[in-house]
Image: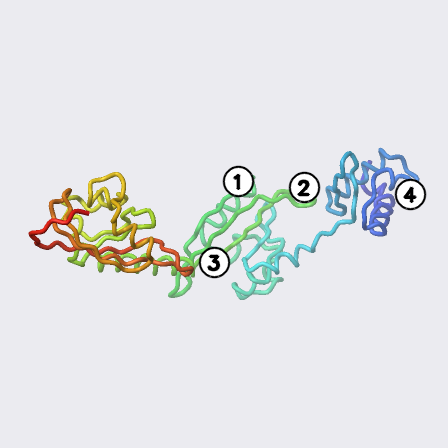
Amino acid sequence: MPVETYQKELAQIKTILKNNPKGMTVTDIAREIKINRNSVAKYLDVLLISGQADMVTFGPAKVFFPSTRIPLSTILNYTYQYIALLDKDLHFLQVNDNLLTALGIQREDIIGRPLDTFTIKFFQIPEIARHAHAASHGQKIIIETRYVEGNHQRFLLIQYIPTISDDGEPGVTLIIDDVTNQHTTEASLRRCTQESDLTFNAITDLVFTTDHECTVIRATKAFAGFLHLPLEDCLGKKCYELLHGSSEPPASCPCTQVQRTKKPMTLTFFEPHLQQHLTIDGFPLLDEKGDVTGAVHVLKTYTNKTNTEL
């Protein structure tokens, strides 16, 4: 039966649901408009599919409510992202205000136009049309794109999401995030880390850093050289494995003492495993709550005729 032949019944049901916001069952609605339950169920299916009604199941009963959908334009303009909806031929159906502002154009300049007719440099990024076409055939794609704008470059994370419109036609939703600031921050962090590594490795003292489980997470090349090991063989090992040749920390282990007291300490001893007289200065690393997250240790060798073992 064509939809237009039961528009009256659909309108009646929508009115009934609106007047009963707490919800109604199929039986309730059928009794109200004096139509058999099977017909009412079919009408409700139409309203559910078209988004004009909502349904919640309570045990065996299905309870129907008036639709509480927010208008699409409101949702699009609420988000900080750039959003565009395209039809299967990649014509613009809808865009949000953020995208219009970013591109410096009016809504009437874009709605209804095909993607590939724009001279705006943003839409001339080659992969946009290619990925949008793939998404219109059901392939979801999320990819990062570099976009050069004048003397500046921007990084965009674009989601190409296959979409089905109310009339059953396929289309594409583009959700675009400008992640340039994130890239800049990550690049700065990498640069700081590299500079920190260069500075750390330039230290000629025997220095190593441990986490809260006494695992060596950083060490100078001088420390590795003292142990006659490659630097990478020191990292990830327990400090007591490297210094004491044991599988458990000794009772007076400087690493565990620093963690227990949360205070700097100095320990001097003779280490049989290395056949060396050693002095270790330990400094706790604390987080914002005052909990120990690890320690920095500075190791020194010295000569002493009296051997005091750890």
Residue at the spot 66% in from the left edge and 45% down from the top edge? 165
Residue holding disc 1:
139
Q: Which residue is mark 2?
A: 168
Give the labeled residue for mark 4. 32
Query: Is label 3 in a helix, a strand or a loop?
Result: strand
Mark 2 crowdedness (10 Å alpha carbons): few <14, some 14-19, many ≥20: few
Q: CA distance from mark 2 to mark 3?
A: 31 Å
Tell me the distance, in whole angstroms, between the alpha carbons under discs 2 and 4. 32 Å
Residue drawn at x 76%, y 47% is: 52
Residue positioned 27% across, 53% down in the render: 209
> Mark 2 or 3, which is nearer the eye?
3
Answer few, some or many: residues within 10 Å of disc 3's Cα (few below 14, many 20 plus, some between 14 and 19). some
Q: Earlier in the sequence, mark 2 or mark 4?
A: 4
- Element type at marker 4? helix
Asked whether disc 2 touches disc 3, contact meaning CB atoms under 8 Å apart, the reply is: no
Indicate the position of residue 61 as horizontal and vertical percent values: 79, 36
Residue 178, numbered label: 3
Give the residue type at disc 4.
Glu
- CA gap, disc 1 and disc 4: 45 Å
Which one is in front in this view, the residue at disc 1 or the one at disc 4?
4
Q: Residue furthest right?
A: 34
- Under mark 1, the amino acid is Gln
Q: Residues within 10 Å of mark 1 (few under 14, many from 20)?
A: some
